[in-house]
Image (tube, helix red, strand yellow):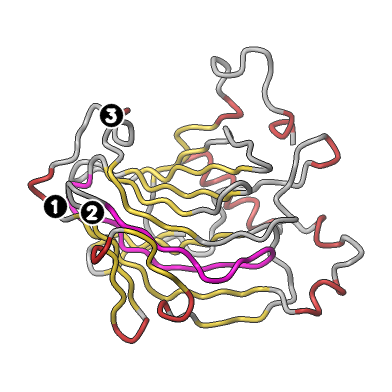
Amino acid sequence: MAYFYNGFSILVLVLVLGIVSTCMVANAGNFHQDFDLTWGDNRAKIYGGGQLLSLSLDKISGSGFQSKKEYLFGRIDMQLKLVAGNSAGTLSSQGPAHDEIDFEFLGNVSGQPYILHTNVFTQGKGNREQQFYLWFLVDSTPIRVFKNGESIGVPYPKNQPMRIYSSLWNADDWATRGGLVKADWSKAPFTAYYRNFNAQTCSGSCNSRFSNGAWQSQELDAYSRRRLRWVQKNFMIYNYCADYKRFPQGFPPECRQ
């Protein structure tokens, strides 16, 4: 989801770890309580009593943070103010290791849209990239669905709890136009801001309610499916399930879903 705030692009990240169930416990987040600053020295900072976090990148180092808790089923929301102006070569990513739901924001020259690069890893296997241009005033709109394909032999990220990771780092060897456009270090430091973290995660009763496997068949409603098709038609710029050159012997099995 995306909308604009004070002239800068604000991204509401909805990181769905495994499944969004109907049995949730909502927790308004505090960065002091919920996250650890993991690298970058003083380039990562928490302000306002834990309500605002920033990551900065200069020519020496980037920075990053991770959640204290692990999550299996639930919904994670975060607002992100991306690097303003000329951000070519920078990249901000979010996702846990091994089983991973990955969002990467590829920087660009001033006036050009960010590219949202997504990937899904299950049991260490990724190569499921989809890319989108960001857009205006779209709220509660899904951009991607990864269905449970265990019945056709595709692992699904439902057994391993995952942490939230985010980092801002130099990727000018590939992030912008395949590395043709380099970071302009005269504009450094590059800074991204995070706020309004909210976690809706399952309480103990969720396991019993969904012990019959009903959560595995939950899908988007008709309206959300239409919005998903609209995004994919108008803003998707790469889909691994349509890359014949990359998969000349046939697409991965989940593409048939």
Label 1–label 2 contact, CB within 8 A: yes
Q: Where is residue 21, by image quadrant? A: bottom right
Furthest toward the right, the residue is 212
Q: Are marks 1 and 3 in contact (CB under 8 Å)?
A: no
The part of the chain drawn in magenta is 62-87
Residue 139 placement, left or right of 189? right
Mark 3 vs mark 2, CA separation in Å: 18 Å
Residue 222 in the image, given as x and y percentages of width and height: 70, 56
Q: Residues within 10 Å of mark 1 (few under 14, many from 20)?
A: some
Q: Is residue 83 above or below residue 153?
A: below
Q: Secondary structure at mark 2?
A: strand
Quick one: label 3 or label 2, which is nearer the N terminus? 2
Q: As drawn, which residue projects farthest toward the left?
A: 186
Residue where numbered disc 1 is placed: 188
Q: Tell me if mark 3 has few (under 14), some (14-19) or many (20+) residues whose alpha carbon lies within 10 angstroms of its own.
A: some
Residue labelled with disc 3 = 179
**Mark found first going from the N terminus, 1 or 3:** 3
Of residues 70 and 131, the one nearer the viewer is 70
Residue 103 falls inside the magenta stretch: no
Residue on which the image places disc 2: 57
On the rendered image, what quadrant is the C terminus found in?
top right
